[in-house]
Amino acid sequence: MSNDQSNSALKLFVVLSRAHKVIHESTNYFFQENGLNPTEFAVLELLYHKGKQPLQQIGNKILLASGSITYVVDKLEGRGYISRVSSDTDRRVTFAEITPTGNAFMDELFPRHEAQLIELMSELTNEDKQIVIELVKKLGLSIKNLSS
């Protein structure tokens, strides 16, 4: 590997890491201000936008270990934001479903979260964002293929 390749790879790693860190810290602070942790928000956001989900599949959809899902679901259920619903067709399957209380909470919270993300990324034009999306997706897919 040439020195230029090494330098640009290291610089890209640092830039991506720093950008992720500042966005992550800002959004985590927003969630905490609103009584949630990032995982709780991710579960609520999934159910809010995609409807009821089998508990066994939530972890994969929000990139979380399945053991943690039960704890998060218990906390959200205790606060009245979601409920567990048994499957009509398979007794082994339990769904998590957002409640009217959870829906009202997300109706108020999600637009503010979206506005925060727009503000955090306002330095980039829509065209810039599309380019970054394509390049980061290309990078992620190439890394996934390397490890397969």
Image: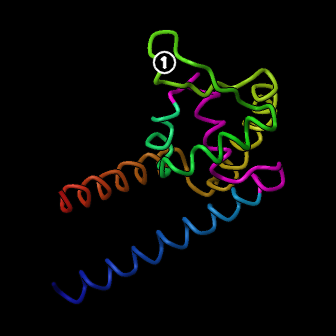
**45 within the magenta span:** yes
Q: Residue 106: image x %, image y %?
A: 75, 32
Residue at 23% across, 89% down:
3
Can you identify the residue that label 1 sits on? 91
Rendering quarter of residue 104: top right
Q: How many marks?
A: 1
**17 within the magenta span:** no
Residue at 24% across, 80% down:
5
- Vertical placement of 64 versus 93: above or below? below
- Vertical placement of 107 versus 1: above or below? above
In this view, the residue farthest toward the top is 88
Residue at 58% across, 23% down:
52
Q: Which residues are magenta?
A: 30-54
In this view, the residue farthest toward the front is 91
Crowding at mark 1 (Cα within 10 Å: few <14, some 14-19, many 20+): few
Rendering quarter of residue 47: top right
Amino acid type for the residue under numbered disc 1: Arg
Q: Residue 113: image x %, image y %?
A: 72, 44
Residue at 19% across, 55% down:
145
Q: Main secondary structure of the magenta part?
A: helix
Which residue is at the front of the view, 99 or 5? Answer: 99
The reply, left or right, for residue 42 in relation to residue 59 is right
Q: Residue 91: image x %, image y %?
A: 48, 18
- Vertical placement of 52 versus 19: above or below? above
The reply, left or right, for residue 116 in relation to residue 95 is right
Which residue is at the front of the view, 9 or 148? Answer: 148
> Which secondary structure lies at badge 1?
loop
The quadrant of the picture occupied by the N terminus is bottom left
The quadrant of the picture occupied by the C terminus is bottom left
Which residue is at the front of the view, 110 or 45? Answer: 45
